[in-house]
Every structure is written in structure tokens, then in C-alpha cells.
Image (cartoon, rainbow, N blue to C red):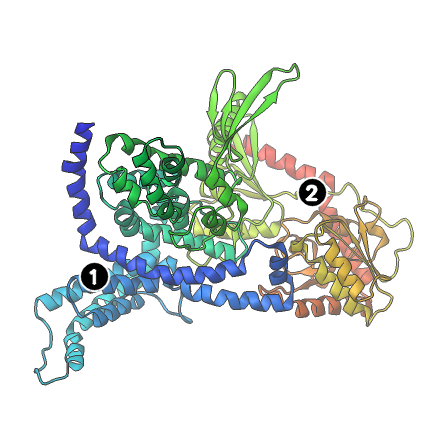
């Protein structure tokens, strides 16, 4: 132990002190701190716009007034988070100029000008480049600009004015030559990248720095390494969080945080587990070393009066994640015995929390920026907008057993707060779901005559991919595979379910999508964003055995829809549209099949408009012979990976009316031939949607397109007959298994 303590004093401490005092790291650390008030303020509005209250979420999404309020709440979020890089540039430039004792204001302005000059402006301010997407460029250009200014000033290459000239004027002229050099060098950088194949410095930095650093920093092992180094420094009395997290890791963690914020605002799956909040809230609960539980133990369980007194002093600050009373009062610093749990406890916390979030049992952090002093449990809930975020901060161990038919134990699962942690068999112990999946795959004894078909890799992707290389591997994609709102010309955010498959597409023999439209989109994205050119085939996710003709005359003016009565299906829009169309066509009837959480809302709308005589909720029934009784099918879903009910509807000869959105509607609705596609927009203004649906319903009947559209639906449905889908599967499997190039 003495040797270890000596190592800390003689080897680690001097190096850490030098790093801590390094001017550029210090400027980055202090400059990033300046961004905190702004992103925390923006986070307040982000929380208000995404409170985990179903009624409020429904109000924001479906009510016209709620939609406007949600839009207003997004403005402060956009102006804070989307200027993260810009604000960081100001802070870093100011702090480094302050270190060099330069004129802070003019130097800061030059740092900002350098950042803006290398940023391409086309049709306005590129917000992705001003936010987290441009954070690393902002750091580089602010440091470069201030170093140029410092060099020029120290070489005394400045315009000096007589003493009689006012100081403000004198400073302006003094900044003239440094400003010229900063602008000239920044301009040369911009031109150099513009004439290169990369286009601009942002693309290069993203490729060279942002993506590798976020991939490393956002990984499990990256977080474990960050935790180890941070707390190791603390054991030597050095503020590890300020040095490592604040000066080195903060830009990476903030970038990951903002990616989650963008995905949350777009209603997409959260891409990252590790963010700033993961580190501050779950890793540092009670302060560095995860010492909140230690403070409780000192206060309530310690038999030593001295330790109890330390517990009394420490419990209050620990509640706000301040643990210096424990670090220096116990002490932990330079204490060879307590150093061990101080380092190991956070590593265990990282492991448990990461795996729980990875498996989906605990919600990921949303991108909300919270002060690191936010108390435990409150912070867990606010950071994830879910009760599981608070629950994981009070982890408990459970065991679940599975039995054979003869009553003997097949295996046990040890869980921490619902997290599948350890699988215990008689002859082996497996840690985590990937290990279990690997064991299962190995038990199959795969060969090249086998084909493994994977649908969504969450938690098992790497194990399946590695073991399936002994055979052939096909990946099924039958849901939206990317986030449109979080993507741009240079970056594509894959859906969490498919990210691993797509980034490892070279190990996949064939991707199987449900529609030709999704195949077209996916092929284009691989061509633009990836070096991979995988085989992609279309095989419908469902089929119909035969075309269904009506047993008797269809009911005139009859409309139908069939789906879960869920928010995302927007049945309320259809109800209101039919109510409006009924004023023009009083013969209209509308039957809704299915059940779900929105049933009470739909009944309220129907009752409020006295529409009980022509709009009916039918519940769950076998629809095989139901579709042919009707004339028109309505759908208001804004996203369908395939749409089984749409296929069943065209198989019964129904014209369809729905949004022009991927992928089901674009597959089963041929605009003007077997129905109508209604243009869709992101703002979803209910009044416009209601009017558009009502107009198309009236148009279909008033222009008497029903017979021709019915024929077109039947013709379209022939491509989805079971024998044709079976043939597609057979052909694909044969091609994959016998293609020698694979």
C-alpha cells in the first residue's frame, strides 16, 4: 500500500497537475462551463414539452392549441442547444485570451469570426454546424484564432496609437493586424477545404474527430475508462471531474447529449446511452466515487462516533452530489484501503446502469441538461422522463428461475432492477443476453448450408453476427430504419434497431425489406452514407390467400378503418373528417374496427358531434369477410412499415385514402388510380388534415371513381397473393445459399 501511495504522490500527481494547468485544456474546460446555464435553461423548456404525462402528450400532439404551445416551447430549446458550439466558441476564446492577458472582447470576437468563416453558409445559418455538430470545429478555431492573436501581439506587430487617443479607439486599432491575420488564415482554411473533395472543415472534423471520439466516449468501455481515470485522480487529491470530464470529455459527452435531444424532439429512438447526464447523474450519484450510499452508511450504520459525525456533515452535501466532506474528512484521498471501493463502486454503477439501459429495461437519458447538483432520484426521473431512471438509482438484486418439465432447474437469471445480468446453467455461467445468444447460436452447429434470419438486433446483434458467419445471414427490415429529422446531407441517424446491422452490412448476405419504396430509400442511403453496397430484396411481410369478392352488394357510402386505437394511428382525425364530409354526403357511414387506449377519446368526439347514428366503434372481429361489405378504406397513420390492414383492404377491392408517407401507404395507394394520397407535413395541423380527408372522400363519390378504383385495388393486390410471396422467399433463399460470390 505504501508503494501505491508513493506512486500516486511521485508519479501520478505531478503529471496530473501539469495536465490540469495546460492552458488549452483549461480554456476548453472553463469555456464549456459557460454553456451550462444556457443548455440548462433550454432543458427546462425541453422538459415542459416532453413531460411523461399521457394526457399532456396527447394534448401537445393532437390538439390544435396544444400543437401551437408545443411549437412555442421548442423555440428556447432550439436557440440554446442549436447554438452550443457557437456559445462554446465564445467561452473558450474568452478564457484563452484571458490567460494570455489579451484584450478579451476583441480576441473573443476574432475567435467567433474564425469559426463562422470556416462554416459554409448557403441559405441561412446552418444550425447543425452551430450546435453540437460544430462543437469540435468551434474548439479548434477558437484556440487557433487566439494563438494567432497572441503570437502577433507578443511579436508587437500591432498598430499603436498615441496616448491621447481614447482607449476604446486604441484597442480597436491594436486588433486590426491580428484580426487581419486571423481572417486571412481562416479564409485560407475554408478555401483549402472547399477545393478539396471534403467540401468544408466540418466534414473532415466530423470524420476524423467527432465520430471516432463520440463512438469511443459513448461506448461502454469508454465510459468505464473515463470513470477509472477520473476517480484515480481523485485518490491523489486532484479534481478528476474538472480535469478529465470538464477539460477533455465534456465536448464529447455534450455532443452525445445533443444527439439524444434531437432524437427526442423528432419523436425518434434515443441513439446514445452515455451522455453528460449519464456521467453526472448515474455515475456520480452523491459525488465522485458514487459516495451517496457511503454517506448514508456513515450516518446510520457506523458504530464510530467520529464516523457518525462525518456522516452528519456529509449527508446534506452528498444529497446534492457534493462529497468533499467525505473525500477529505474520512479521508478517501491518499487512503490505500478506501481507494479500492472508491474506484470500483462507480465502475459497477456504470456497468449496471449501462446494461439496464442497453437492454431497454431502463429508459435512456433524453438529452435534458440538468445541474450536476440535482439530488438523486429526482435527477434520474428528470433525465430519463421515466420512473425507471429513478428506480435504477436504487438497485436491488433478484433471481428468476426456469424449470424443466420434470421439476429440475434449467437455469437461473440474476437481475438487478429487472436487468438480465447473469444466466446460470449447471455447467456454465453467462453474463448478459449477448453471451446467452452466443451460447444458443453455437448450440445450433451452423454451416454454410444454413441461413440465419435476424429481425432487430437489440442486445444480441454482435453475437448473432459473429456466429452467423459460419452460415449465411439475412436481416429483415420491416419498420422505419432511420430518423429523417435528425439526418442531413452529411449524416444519417439509423434507427437503434438497425444501426448495428447497417454499419456491419459487409457481414450480411442479404437485407430483406417489405416494400419497393423502402428498398429504393435504403439503397440510396447506402450509396450516399456508406461504403457498403449490400444486396437488398423486397419480400412483403404478409400475404393474402386469395382476392375476396363481396358475398352481396356493398353497403353504399360505407367507410371503414381497422387498427389499434392508439395515438399514432390518429383515428380521431378520421372521425372529425367524416363528420365534416357528412355535411356534404349525409348518406356516409364510418365503422371503426379495433380497440385500444384512444377508445374513450373517440367516443367523446362522436358524442360531442352527435354522430352516433353514422360513426360506430365495432371492437375486435375477424375481418376476413368484413372488408368486402364496405366501399372505401381510410387510414391516418403517419408511418407504416408495411400495413397489413392496407393489404387486406386492397385484397377486398377497397379504394384507400391516406397520407403520402412511407412505406405502406406509398405501396398500397396509387394516387388517382385506387385511391388518394394526401400530402403530409411535420406540423400536423388538425384543421387542414380534417379538411383534406373530407375533400377526398367527397371527391371520390361525387366524381364516381369507385368502380375503376375498385378494379385497380384488386389488380394491385395480386402481387401480394401467398403463392407469389412464397416464390419470392424461395428465390431469395436459393440465391443466397447458392451464390458463390457471397
Placement of the N terminus among the 4 image quadrants: top left
* Res 569 → quadrant: bottom right
In this view, 480 is above or below 202: above
Rendering coords of residue 49 (x, y %): 53, 61
Rendering coords of residue 192 (x, y %): 26, 62
Is 296 on the left or on the right of 593, as rendered? left
Residue at 41 percent of width and 49 percent of height: 277
Residue at 18 percent of width and 38 percent of height: 12
* Res 722 → quadrant: top right
Rendering coords of residue 492 (x, y %): 46, 53
In the rendered image, the residue lying farthest to the right is: 552
Mark 1, residues whose alpha carbon is within 10 Å: few (<14), some, or many (≥20)?
A: many
Instruction: Determine the CA span between mark 2 and mark 1.
Output: 62 Å
Residue at 9 percent of width and 78 percent of height: 160
SS for tag 1?
Answer: helix
Residue 196 visible here: no
Mark 2 or 1, closer to the camera:
1
In this view, 216 is above or below 402: below
Q: Which residue is label 1 attached to? A: 96
- Give the label on residue 602, or none: none
SS for tag 2?
Answer: loop
Q: Nearer the viewer, residue 100 or 338?
A: 338
**Which badge, 2 or 1, comes first in the chain's sequence?**
1
Rendering coords of residue 48 (x, y %): 52, 60
In this view, 5 is above or below 560: above
In this view, 603 is above or below 275: below
In the rendered image, the residue lying farthest to the bottom is: 164
Q: Which residue is label 2 attached to? A: 542
Is 655 on the left or on the right of 130, as rendered? right
Amino acid at each position: 500500500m505504501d508503494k501505491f501511495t508513493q506512486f500516486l504522490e511521485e508519479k501520478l500527481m505531478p503529471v496530473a497537475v501539469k495536465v490540469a494547468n495546460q492552458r488549452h485544456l483549461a480554456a476548453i474546460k472553463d469555456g464549456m462551463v459557460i454553456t451550462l446555464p444556457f443548455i440548462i435553461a433550454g432543458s427546462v423548456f425541453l422538459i415542459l414539452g416532453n413531460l411523461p404525462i399521457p394526457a399532456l402528450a396527447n394534448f401537445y400532439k393532437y390538439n390544435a392549441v396544444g400543437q401551437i404551445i408545443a411549437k412555442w416551447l421548442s423555440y428556447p430549446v432550439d436557440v440554446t442547444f442549436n447554438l452550443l458550439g457557437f456559445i462554446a466558441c465564445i467561452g473558450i476564446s474568452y478564457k484563452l485570451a484571458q490567460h494570455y492577458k489579451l484584450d478579451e472582447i476583441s480576441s473573443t470576437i476574432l475567435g467567433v469570426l474564425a469559426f463562422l468563416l470556416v462554416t459554409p453558409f448557403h441559405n441561412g445559418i446552418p444550425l447543425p454546424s452551430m450546435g453540437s455538430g460544430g462543437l469540435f470545429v468551434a474548439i479548434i478555431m477558437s484556440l487557433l484564432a487566439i494563438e494567432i492573436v497572441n503570437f502577433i501581439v507578443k511579436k508587437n506587430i500591432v498598430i499603436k496609437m498615441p496616448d491621447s487617443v481614447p482607449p476604446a479607439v486604441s484597442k480597436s486599432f491594436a486588433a486590426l493586424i491580428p484580426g487581419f491575420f486571423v481572417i486571412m488564415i481562416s479564409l485560407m482554411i475554408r478555401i483549402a477545404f472547399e477545393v478539396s473533395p471534403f467540401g468544408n472543415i466540418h466534414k473532415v472534423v466530423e470524420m476524423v474527430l467527432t465520430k471516432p471520439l463520440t463512438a469511443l466516449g459513448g461506448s461502454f468501455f469508454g465510459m468505464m475508462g473515463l470513470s477509472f481515470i477520473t476517480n484515480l485522480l481523485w485518490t491523489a487529491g486532484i479534481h478528476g471531474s474538472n480535469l478529465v470530464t470538464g477539460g477533455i470529455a465534456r465536448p464529447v459527452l455534450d455532443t452525445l447529449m445533443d444527439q439524444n435531444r434531437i432524437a427526442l424532439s423528432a419523436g425518434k429512438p434515443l441513439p446514445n446511452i452515455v451522455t453528460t447526464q449519464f456521467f453526472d447523474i448515474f455515475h456520480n450519484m452523491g459525488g465522485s466515487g458514487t459516495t451517496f450510499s457511503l454517506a448514508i452508511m456513515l450516518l446510520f450504520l457506523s458504530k464510530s462516533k467520529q464516523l457518525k459525525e462525518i456522516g452528519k456533515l456529509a449527508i446534506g452535501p452528498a444529497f446534492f452530489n457534493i462529497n468533499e466532506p467525505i473525500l477529505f474528512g474520512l479521508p478517501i484521498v491518499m487512503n490505500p484501503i478506501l481507494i479500492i471501493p472508491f474506484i470500483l463502486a462507480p465502475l459497477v454503477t456504470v456497468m449496471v446502469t449501462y446494461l439496464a439501459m442497453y437492454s431497454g429495461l431502463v429508459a435512456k437519458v433524453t438529452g435534458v441538461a440538468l445541474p450536476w447538483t440535482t439530488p438523486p432520484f429526482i435527477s434520474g426521473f428528470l433525465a430519463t422522463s421515466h420512473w425507471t431512471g429513478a428506480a435504477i438509482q436504487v438497485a436491488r438484486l433478484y433471481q428468476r428461475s426456469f424449470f424443466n418439465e420434470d421439476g429440475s432447474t434449467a437455469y437461473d437469471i440474476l437481475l438487478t432492477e429487472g436487468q438480465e445480468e447473469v444466466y446460470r446453467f449447471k455447467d456454465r455461467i453467462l453474463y448478459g443476453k449477448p453471451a446467452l445468444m452466443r451460447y444458443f447460436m453455437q448450440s445450433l452447429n451452423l454451416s454454410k448450408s444454413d441461413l440465419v434470419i435476424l429481425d432487430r438486433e437489440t442486445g444480441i446483434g454482435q453475437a448473432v453476427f459473429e456466429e452467423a458467419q459460419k452460415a449465411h445471414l439475412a436481416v429483415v427490415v420491416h419498420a422505419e430504419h432511420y430518423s429523417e429529422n435528425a439526418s442531413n446531407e452529411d449524416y444519417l441517424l439509423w434507427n437503434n434497431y438497425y444501426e448495428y446491422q447497417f454499419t456491419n452490412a459487409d457481414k450480411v448476405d442479404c437485407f430483406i425489406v417489405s416494400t419497393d419504396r423502402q428498398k429504393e430509400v435504403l439503397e440510396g442511403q447506402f450509396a450516399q452514407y456508406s461504403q457498403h453496397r449490400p444486396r437488398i430484396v423486397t419480400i412483403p411481410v404478409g400475404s393474402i390467400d386469395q382476392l375476396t369478392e363481396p358475398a352481396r352488394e356493398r353497403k353504399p357510402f360505407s367507410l371503414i378503418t381497422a387498427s389499434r386505437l392508439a395515438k399514432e394511428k390518429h383515428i380521431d382525425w378520421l372521425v372529425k373528417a367524416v363528420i365534416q364530409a357528412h355535411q356534404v354526403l349525409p348518406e356516409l357511414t364510418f365503422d371503426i374496427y379495433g380497440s385500444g387506449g384512444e377508445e374513450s377519446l373517440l367516443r367523446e368526439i362522436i358524442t360531442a358531434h352527435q354522430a352516433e347514428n353514422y360513426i360506430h366503434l365495432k371492437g375486435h372481429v375477424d375481418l376476413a369477410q368484413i372488408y368486402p361489405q364496405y366501399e372505401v378504406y381510410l387510414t391516418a397513420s403517419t408511418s407504416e412499415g408495411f400495413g397489413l390492414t392496407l393489404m387486406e383492404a386492397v385484397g377486398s377491392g377497397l379504394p384507400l385514402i391516406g397520407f403520402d408517407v412511407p412505406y405502406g401507404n406509398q405501396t398500397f395507394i396509387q394516387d388517382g388510380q385506387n385511391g388518394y394520397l394526401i400530402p403530409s407535413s411535420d406540423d400536423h395541423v388538425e384543421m387542414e388534415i380534417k379538411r383534406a380527408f373530407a375533400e377526398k372522400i367527397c371527391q371520390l363519390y361525387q366524381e364516381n371513381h369507385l368502380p375503376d378504383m375498385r378494379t385497380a385495388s384488386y389488380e394491385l393486390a395480386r402481387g401480394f397473393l401467398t403463392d407469389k410471396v412464397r416464390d419470392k422467399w424461395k428465390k431469395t433463399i436459393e440465391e443466397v445459399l447458392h451464390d458463390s460470390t457471397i
